[in-house]
Image (spheres, helix red, strand yellow):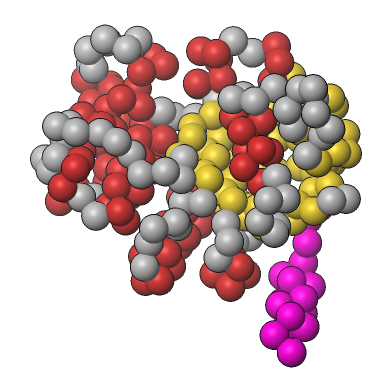
Amino acid sequence: MKIRLEKLSVGYKGFAPVVSDINVEIRSGELTCLIGSNGIGKSTLLKTLTGFLPKLSGQLLLDGRDMDMLTQRERAKLIGIVLTQRIDVQNLSVTDTIGMGRTPYTGFWGKLNNEDIAIVDKAIEMVGISHLRTRMIQTLSDGERQKVMIAKALAQETPIILLDEPTSFLDFPSKVEMLQLLHRLAKETDKVIFLSTHDLELALRIADCLVELNKDGLHRVEADKVKTEIEQLLQ
């Protein structure tokens, strides 16, 4: 699986594009981190990739399939999403919350069958939160909640997982653990795992690939180049 962006322009209809002429390929089996300055358009790009925001022009291809030609249900079977804001969920257990990832296959009110339950259990084990499965979601720390939402995305069984600032609200050790977890999951599951981050130092150490968004578009960048730019800023 891969995401291919060809001459893509993103933004809001009726206004000038936030970023134009985006040409890049994001591959499975890699942890790819999206970097760029504040306000450059990282969230706008992610919203476009998820289908929350329509593209202005160009092509957005998921394994060669045009995103515009997919139904909402088809997208839900291709793309799992973990957003940056704290989840506002009450009185649901960790297991029940992760089980909601099966909604594209069961429907909103669908009852989980034995296969669904096995998939949820596997997601819980992969993320390493078996000890939390009976806890209520509102009792968890921010780091634990993020792990639950990642397990929910895994239970959705999509080949693509997109994350918007997954290390926000986390202390430094939890940030490291989170990126290491995502790196391991990319390798073990051969999924596209693509996230935006401001934690440049961690991204440089852990990510397989960095893509930088700037006024000239979106480009793969070498870690050494980013390190040099950081050192110049600190001089």
Q: Position of residue 230 (x, y in %)?
A: 71, 77
Left or right: residue 79 versus residue 60 is: left
State the image quarter where residue 203 is shown. bottom right
| Figure check: 90 above or below 216 | above
Q: Position of residue 23 (x, y in %)?
A: 84, 41
Which residues lie in the magenta part?
219-235
The outermost residue toward the bottom is: 235
Q: Is residue 111 magenta?
A: no
User: Which residue is more in the foreground, 36 or 190?
Assistant: 36
| Figure check: 205 above or below 51 | below
Q: Position of residue 151 (x, y in %)?
A: 34, 40
Left or right: residue 120 versus residue 32 is: left
For the N terminus, the quadrant is: top right
Residue at 22% in and 12% down: 111
Please name the predominant secondary structure of the magenta segment in the image: helix
Q: Is residue 33 visible?
A: yes
